[in-house]
Amino acid sequence: MNRRNFIAGAAGALTFSGAIAAETVAETAAAEATDPVFKAFADALPQHSWQMGYEGLQADAAPMTLSLRGQMPRGLRGALYRNGPSRHSIGGVRYHHLFDGDGMVQKYEITDAGITHRGKFVRTEKFIADSKAGKPVRQTFGTNPPDAQPITGPDSLNVANTSVVSHGGELMALWEGGSAIKLDAQTLDTLGPKVLSPEYAGMAFSAHPKIERDGTLWNFGVTSHLGLLSVYRIAPSGEVLKTETIKVRDIAMVHDFAVTEQHLVFLLPPLVFDRDRARSGETFLDCHVWKPQLGMRVLVLPKDHLDQPQWFDLPAGFVFHVGNAWEDTTAGTIRLDYIRSPDAWSPLHGLRDVMSGRFERTGNAGIAFVGLNLKTGRANQTLVNQETEFPRVDPRVVGVKHSQLFTTLRLDTGPRPGFDAVMRMDVASGKTDRYRYGTDVMVEEHVFVPKPGGSGKEGDGWLVGTALDLKKKAMLLSVFDAMHLSKGPIAQATMDRVMPLGFHSIFVGA
C-alpha cells in the first residue's frame, strides 16, 4: 500500500456499531502532517513489505472463506481465536508503541464444511470513547494524547489486545492492566467486563492465566503505582475461590508467570516502576526504569500460603514469556524455562520502532532453563542460544514435568522484525525439530492442540498457527503433526487478505 492509500484508508468513514465519528481526508491529512510517527510510517511503506503487518485496520473483518491445501485432520474441529492490537491509528494520529492499538479478536473456525475467518474489535470503554471523538482521547501503554480525558479507573485505558481465554463457559479478551472482557464465542460481539468480585472490579487481570489439568485457573495482576501483586484462583466453573494481594518492593513489569503443583512462580526483571516519573505525566512505559543492579528477582509463592513468599536471584535480564515449571521433588527444586533477553530493548525501543517503520537488529532472546532450590534458596540458570519467542507446551502438562517446548524461531528473516520458523525442542536432550516458512513469511504464535481420542501422551497432537505471507499478501493457517514439524504442514489454509500481526491465541474444540 502506498502512502496516499495509507492516509486515505486511515481517513475513511468507520463502520463500527454505535456512535462513531466519520472523518474527511482533509482532516486526516492535517493531523498526519503534525504527527511524526504517522508520517514516518507512511514514508517508509514503499521500502518495507513487512510494514503491512503493522498498518492496522479501521473496521471489523467480515466473514471470509479460506482455501485449503491438504486435508484437515478429522479430529481438529473448533476455532482458533487470536488477539492483538489492530487499530494502530485514528484521525491521522498513530500510536507510538505496538502495545497501544485497540484489540481485535479473530476467529478461524474449522468445520466439516471448511474454514471461515472473521474478526471484531473489542468494544472497550476506551475504544468507544476514541471512536466517538474520531481521535485518541485516552492514554495508552506508550502514548499520551495531549488532550487526554481523565482516568476514572483501570478500564478507562483497557485495550483488550493481548490474549484470549476460554474458561467457565466464557470467552474473554485479555489485557494487562484491567478487566477481562467477555465476548460472544460465536459472533465475537462484546458483552462487557468480567467482574470477579465487587472489591476486585476493574483490577488488573493478566493476559497469561494458567489452567491446570483439573480446570482450575490461576492468574495475577500488577497495580504498579501501589506496588501490589494480586493473585486469583478460579474454579473450573468460573467461581472465584481465592484472591490475595501482597506488597512487592520495586514492582517490575511482569507479563507472565508459571504454576507448579504446589507453587506460583514470578520472574521480576529489573524494569521497575518509578512513581516520580508517573507524577510527572510520563507514559506508563516511560514510568519504568532499567536497573540491572537489581538482577532478575524470582518470587515463589506456595499455593496454600500466598502470604509466605520466597525470593531467589538470577542475573539481570528481561522476560516476556514463561514456558512451563514443575516440582523436582527428588532435588527439592522447581524447574522452569522462559525466554530471556539480555535487556529491555524490545519493549523500550524495538516495539516503538515498528510503529514508525523502523527495524534494528539487537541482542537475541534465547531459552533459559532455571533451577530454584527451595531448601537452600539458591538459583541456577543455563542459556540456550536460539532466537525464539512465544513458548508453549502441551496443555496436559501445565505445572508438571514436560519434555517438549514449542516456540517461534528466527533463522534468516533479513532486515525485518519477527520470526520465520517454528520449533520443537526436547528439553532433556536439547535436540530440535523445526520448520522454516521462509524469509517472506512473518510467523505468529503457534499453539498445541491435543488429539481427541489419541494416546494422551505428551506431544500427541497438532501444532496450529498463523503467519503473514508478504509476497502473496495473504494469511496462512497451518496445521503440523506436532512431533514432526520438519515434514511441513499436513494442511494449510490461505486467506486473501492481510490481518494485523498479533500476540496470543487459543484453540477451542467444537
Image (cartoon, rainbow, N blue to C red):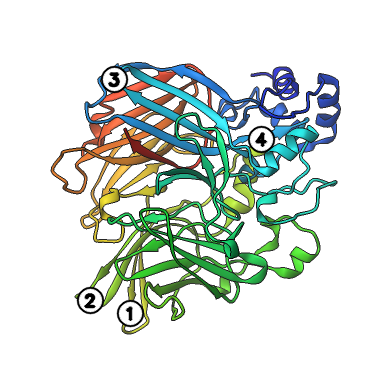
Residue 82: numbered disc: none
Which residue is depicted at the point 31% across and 50% down?
A: 393
The answer to which of marks 2 and 1 sits earlier in the sequence is 2
The Cα–Cα distance between marks 4 and 1, rounded to whole angstroms, is 45 Å
The Cα–Cα distance between marks 1 and 3, rounded to whole angstroms, is 50 Å
Residue 440 shows up from this direction: no
| Type of amino acid under label 1 | Leu
Q: Secondary structure at mark 2?
A: loop
Q: Where does label 1 land, which residue?
A: 374
Q: Is residue 55 left or right of residue 507?
A: right
The answer to which of marks 4 and 2 sits earlier in the sequence is 4
The answer to which of marks 1 and 3 sits earlier in the sequence is 3
Residue 112: numbered disc: 3
The Cα–Cα distance between marks 4 and 2, rounded to whole angstroms, is 49 Å
Q: Secondary structure at mark 4?
A: loop
Quarter containing the N terminus: top right
Q: Where does label 2 land, which residue?
A: 331
Q: Where does label 4 land, which residue?
A: 88
In the rendered image, the vertical position of residue 173 relative to residue 318, given as above or below: above
In the image shown, does 441 or 395 lie closer to the viewer?
395
**Residue at the left extreme of this rendering:** 455
| Type of amino acid under label 3 | Asp
Residues at marks 4 and 1 touching, judged by CB atoms closer than 8 Å:
no
Which residue is depicted at the point 57% across and 76% down?
A: 247
Within the image, what quadrant is residue 284 found in? bottom right
How many marks do you count on the picture?
4
| Type of amino acid under label 4 | His
Within the image, what quadrant is residue 489 found in? top left
Residues at marks 2 and 3 touching, judged by CB atoms closer than 8 Å:
no
Q: Secondary structure at mark 1?
A: loop
Quarter containing the C terminus: top left
